[in-house]
């Protein structure tokens, strides 16, 4: 309920007459009826938007459905990419703080792992003659 402050204090003081109370009651019921009408129109609108089965199946309806799906997919993809990026940044910050407080622990980044793997692959393996039979 949206109380008007004066009405609220009048009710608290109990100085309202029964006629005034009846007037506010009729006001409240009219407001409730207006709210119910608004809810009905909203429900009708939602039903009309979601009730696509009743519409005839045409190229236009098909294209609108496909376009809506594309928009949803695009939004989902951007949201997932943003979450991945935020997670990487968060993990990076965590590793930096860990590195500040515990400098003895070596934290290897992806670039360092990549460099190490390239160095390992670039060195030729020394094979012994005993292995080849």
Image (cartoon, rainbow, N blue to C red):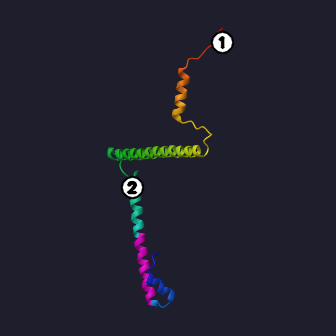
- Which type of secondary structure does the marked residue at label 2 adopt? helix
Q: Is residue 112 left or right of residue 54?
A: right
Q: Is residue 5 left or right of residue 120?
A: left
Q: Is residue 126 left or right of residue 118?
A: right
Q: Nearer the viewer, residue 94 or 69?
A: 94
Q: Nearer the viewer, residue 91 or 26?
A: 91
Chief SS of the magenta region: helix
Q: Which mark is residue 49?
A: 2
Q: Quadrant of residue 48?
A: bottom left
- Can you give x and y, in whole percent of width and height, for residue 28 in the image? 44, 79
Q: Say whether residue 51 is magenta.
A: no
Residue at x-position 54% and y-position 36%: 109
- What whole-number distance in Å separates the C-alpha atoms at marks 2 and 1? 74 Å
Q: Say whether residue 21 is magenta.
A: yes
Q: Residues within 10 Å of mark 2 (few under 14, many from 20)?
A: few
- Locate the C terminus and report the quarter of the image it occupies: top right
Q: Which mark is residue 23?
A: none
Q: How many marks?
A: 2
Residue at x-position 60% and y-position 42%: 103
Circle nearer the N terminus (2, 1) = 2
- Which type of secondary structure does the marked residue at label 1 adopt? loop
- Can you give x and y, in whole percent of width and height, for residue 70 in the image? 39, 44
Marks 1 and 2: in contact by CB < 8 Å? Answer: no
Q: Identify the residue position indicated by label 1 in the image.
A: 131
Determine the residue located farthest toward the right in the rendered image: 130
Q: Which residues are magenta?
A: 19-36
Residue at x-position 52% and y-position 29%: 115
């Amino acid at each position: 309920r949206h109380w008007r402050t004066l009405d609220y204090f009048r009710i608290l003081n109990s100085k309202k007459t029964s006629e005034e109370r009846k007037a506010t009651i009729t006001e409240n019921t009219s407001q409730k009826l207006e709210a119910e009408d608004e809810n009905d129109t909203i429900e009708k609108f939602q039903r009309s938007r979601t009730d696509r089965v009743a519409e005839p199946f045409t190229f236009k309806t098909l294209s609108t459905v496909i376009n809506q799906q594309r928009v949803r997919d695009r939004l989902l993809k951007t949201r997932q990419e943003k979450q991945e990026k935020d997670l990487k940044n968060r993990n990076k910050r965590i590793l930096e703080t860990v590195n500040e407080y515990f400098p003895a622990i070596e934290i290897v980044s992806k670039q360092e792992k990549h460099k190490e793997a390239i160095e390992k692959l670039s060195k030729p393996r020394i094979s012994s003659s005993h292995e080849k039979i």
